Image (cartoon, rainbow, N blue to C red):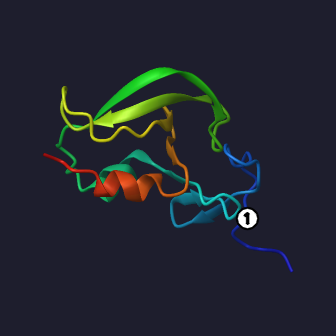
Amino acid sequence: MTEPYRTGLAPCPNCGRELRIDAERLRCDGCGGTMLGYPEVRESLGIPREGRLVWVDGKLGRRKCPRCTAHMLVTCIRLTSTKVLSDLTLDRCETDGVWFDRNELSKLIAAPRS
């Protein structure tokens, strides 16, 4: 039986397995990674549309975006120009969103905001 939610997208940027679409998210059943678009990242972190969210980008990483196959930037998130939200290093496609490895999103959501 075929699985209706499998995609023709590029493979998981972490483990190389096929991804599935779950609402607007891309999910990997192999490693537990998830890709969210920017509006969903803001919503998940409880940041209002007009709230400040700054991406502190490093160099291009080795991982490719599963939507457009461009190399993703290695990044972290700031809520203001000075306050780093978390010490997590994430992978970000400038066009399509952010790749979260297993448990990274939950760690980011739980990170202190003060």
Q: On the image, numbered disc 1 is attached to which residue?
A: 6
Rendering coords of residue 61 (x, y %): 60, 26
Image quadrant containing the N terminus: bottom right
On screen, 72 above or below 100?
A: above
Rendering coords of residue 82 (x, y %): 18, 27
Instruction: Report the side of 28 relative to 75 (left or right).
Output: right
Q: Single out the residue that lies furthest toward the left.
A: 114
Q: Single out the residue that lies furthest toward the right.
A: 1
Q: In percent of the image, x 19 and y 51: which residue is there?
A: 48
Rendering coords of residue 4 (x, y %): 73, 73
Q: In percent of the image, x 22 and y 38: which residue is there?
A: 79
Instruction: Report the side of 98 relative to 4 (left or right).
Output: left
Q: Amino acid at mark 1?
A: Arg
Rendering coords of residue 104 (x, y %): 46, 52
Total number of numbered discs in the rendering: 1
Classify residue 32 by image quadrant.
bottom right
Q: Nearer the viewer, residue 15 or 37?
A: 15
Q: In percent of the image, x 69 and y 49: which residue is there?
A: 12
Classify residue 33 by image quadrant.
bottom right
On screen, 11 above or below 61?
A: below
Image quadrant containing the C terminus: top left
SS class, disc 1: loop
